[in-house]
């Protein structure tokens, strides 16, 4: 039984790419066809929240280690690169001549910034989601023992219902900025996505999920984002019923299905000894997935500096060249940071490695 599910690492790259393309479309702009398709690529963060719950539940379900050890491991995983990216972002602000958000940056280093509307973006705008993850990590050791097999289905159904209900509740908030903070950034609002991921991870370990086809679930995710194009053309982002919040709050079930299908493909490959793995488990996507955390945290900093130095490119070939240059530069930077900062710091802070319990063997219904 594999301790790691490589397809999930490969999917991390595609989710990070969705977020990067979202920022390129919104900030750089000028590229037809692709721009509208990724206009709501911020939904990639929802994927990461669901994936985080799934992977942590899969990994720690039968781990007897105390909560303090879990917290240390998670801090070692995210904080060093978060601190470095915050410093790089502040340096970029200083070079550009923008007022330094020092108070927000200090708050973000404590992973508290999404709790305050004026401080949500912290020192590094892309790092807001780590404040939500910090909240999830705080809850995880407390919630995990309570999620017995009997409670998984009710929990999953509750989380699936909360997404649409929260989105509909946005109709009661007239201020678009306040609504966005409440629905898109505030940690309790995002918690159902993490809990849905936990339910998926635990159900996968216990073989309680029906087999899902990976290809069709991936197509469903792509179709969802394409359907957002006419929706966005009909309703402005400032309206509560636009895809701006819906793209994140309503996409969790699709991402949960995609994660389930990818994990099941890996489990099937491990059980049957298949030589050809599922497409997200290709070594290229797995390598890029390993870089995805650094890419997510630093790409917006490079884009910001690029725009200050060169401005917005014209449409056509110039815009395409700008997108390709930024994708190449930011991914190369992410690779360097992963190998020379992220991994060494994590190994040093985690302490001596200890083996986790082997996952439970899933039944045939899960594989």
Image: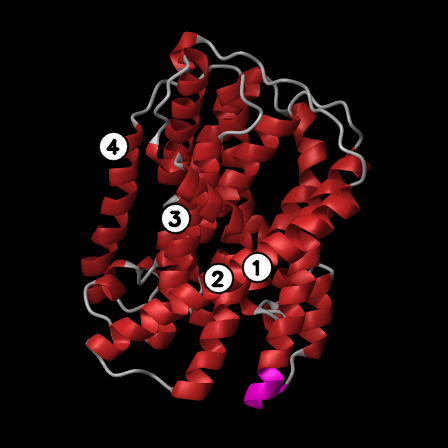
Q: x%, y% of residue 66?
A: 80, 30
Start-end of magenta stretch: 93-99
Which mark is first along the chain, 1 or 3? 3
Q: Mark 1: few, some, or many residues within 10 Å (few <14, many ≥20)?
A: few
Measure the C-alpha gap from mark 3 to mark 4: 16 Å
Q: Which of labels 1 and 4 is toward the front?
A: 1
Q: Which mark is residue 55?
A: none
Residue pointed to by mark 2 = 332
The answer to whether the residue labelled 1 contacts the one labelled 4, judged by CB atoms less than 8 Å apart, is no
Q: x%, y% of residue 41?
A: 36, 57
Q: Which of labels 2 and 3 is toward the front?
A: 2
The answer to whether the residue labelled 1 contacts the one labelled 2, judged by CB atoms less than 8 Å apart, is yes
Q: Secondary structure at mark 2?
A: helix
Q: x%, y% of residue 177?
A: 47, 71
Measure the C-alpha gap from mark 4 to mark 2: 32 Å
Residue pointed to by mark 1 = 336
Is residue 180 visible in the rendered structure shown here? Answer: no
Q: Which mark is residue 14?
A: 3
Q: Secondary structure at mark 4?
A: helix
Which mark is first along the chain, 4 or 1? 4
Quadrant of the image for the C terminus?
Answer: top left
Residue pointed to by mark 4 = 216
Q: Residue at x 26, y 39 (%)?
A: 220
């Amino acid at each position: 039984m594999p301790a790691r599910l490589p397809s999930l690492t490969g999917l991390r790259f595609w989710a990070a790419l969705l977020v990067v393309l979202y920022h390129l479309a919104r900030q750089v702009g000028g590229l037809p066809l692709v721009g509208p398709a990724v206009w709501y690529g911020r939904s990639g963060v929802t994927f990461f929240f669901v994936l985080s719950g799934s992977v942590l539940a899969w990994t720690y379900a039968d781990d007897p280690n105390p909560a303090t050890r879990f917290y240390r491991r998670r801090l070692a995983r995210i904080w060093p690169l978060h601190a470095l990216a915050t410093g790089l972002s502040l340096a970029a602000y200083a070079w550009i001549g923008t007022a330094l958000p020092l108070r927000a940056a200090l708050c973000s280093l404590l992973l508290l910034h999404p709790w305050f509307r004026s401080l949500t973006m912290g020192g590094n705008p892309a790092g807001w989601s780590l404040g939500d993850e910090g909240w999830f990590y705080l809850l995880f050791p407390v919630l995990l023992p309570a999620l017995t097999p009997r409670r998984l289905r009710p929990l999953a159904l509750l989380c699936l219902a909360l997404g649409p209900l929260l989105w509909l509740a946005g109709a009661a908030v007239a201020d678009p900025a306040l609504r966005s903070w409440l629905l898109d950034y505030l940690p309790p609002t995002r918690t159902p996505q993490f809990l849905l991921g936990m339910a998926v991870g635990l159900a996968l370990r216990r073989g309680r999920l029906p087999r899902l086809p990976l290809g069709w679930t991936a197509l469903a995710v792509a179709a969802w984002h394409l359907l957002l194009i006419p929706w966005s053309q009909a309703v402005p982002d400032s309206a509560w019923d636009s895809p701006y919040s819906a793209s994140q709050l309503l996409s969790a079930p699709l991402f949960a299905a995609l994660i389930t299908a990818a994990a099941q493909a890996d489990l099937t490959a491990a059980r049957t000894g298949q030589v050809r793995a599922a497409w997200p488990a290709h070594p290229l996507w797995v390598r890029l997935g390993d870089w995805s955390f650094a890419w997510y945290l630093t790409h917006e900093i490079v884009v910001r500096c690029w725009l200050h130095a060169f401005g917005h490119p014209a449409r056509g070939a110039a815009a395409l060249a700008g997108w390709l240059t930024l994708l190449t530069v930011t991914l190369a930077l992410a690779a360097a940071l992963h190998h020379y900062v992220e991994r060494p710091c994590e190994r040093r802070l985690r302490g001596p490695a200890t083996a986790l319990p082997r996952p439970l063997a899933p039944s045939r219904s899960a594989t």
